[in-house]
Amino acid sequence: MNERIDSLQAHLRKHPQDRFAMYSLALEYKKLGEIDLAKAAFEELLQAHPQSGAGHYQHGLLWAEAGNVTAARAAWSTGLERLLGLRTPDARRSTSEIQAALDDLDDD
């Protein structure tokens, strides 16, 4: 598909649970407009790493950009549930981003 994707896929064959590589692969698919591959990659990431705040945010954003507000809301709501009670700076930032995205959906 492209060199970056090939590199990430090769890395993931050796390190299949690498959260950053899984996230990066999903973003690369999204950037190329490979929406179905991006959705599947985000779902795989979130199954392996359910507390990936950035993964939940980008997964919902992918749905929103595809025009599926219901799926976006569901993805972001799941993200908020998974991050509930986490006090790390990353979790707090992701929670804030996800809540803002949900609020934006409600404003439309």
Image (cartoon, grey):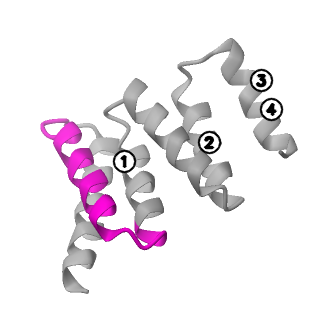
Q: Amino acid at mark 3?
A: Ala
Tag 4's secondary structure?
A: helix
Badge number at residue 24: 2
Circle 1: residue type:
His
Question: Dot 4: few (<14), some (14–19), or many (≥20) neighbours within 10 Å?
Answer: few
* Residue at the outermost top position: 14
Residue at the spot of label 3 = 10
Do the residues under discs 1 and 3 have CB atoms within 8 angstroms? Answer: no
Q: Residue furthest left?
A: 85
Q: Give the quadrant of residue 41.
A: top right
Quadrant of residue 64 within the rendered picture: bottom left
Q: Determine the residue located farthest toward the bottom in the rendered image.
A: 108
Disc 3 element: helix
At x 51% / y 48%, what residue is drawn? Answer: 39
User: Are the two marked residues, 1 and 2, in contact with CB atoms closer than 8 angstroms?
Assistant: no
Q: Is residue 97 visible?
A: no
Pointer 4 with pointer 2, Cβ within 8 A? no
At mark 1, the secondary structure is: helix
Q: Is residue 24 visible?
A: yes
Closer to the N terminus: mark 1 or mark 3? 3
Which residue range is magenta in the image? 64-86
Vertical order, 2 against 76 (above or below):
above
The picture places residue 88, in percent across and down from the top left corner, at 27, 37
* Labels 4 and 3 touching (C-beta < 8 A): yes
Residue that carries the numbered disc 4 in the rendered image? 7
Instruction: List x then y, in percent, for residue 14.
Output: 70, 13
Q: Is residue 67 magenta?
A: yes
Indicate left or right for 6 with 31 as reference: right
Position of 75 with respect to 20 (left or right) is left
Query: The N terminus is located in which quarter?
Result: top right
Residue shown at the point (25%, 55%) measured from the top left:
74
Q: Which mark is residue 56?
A: 1
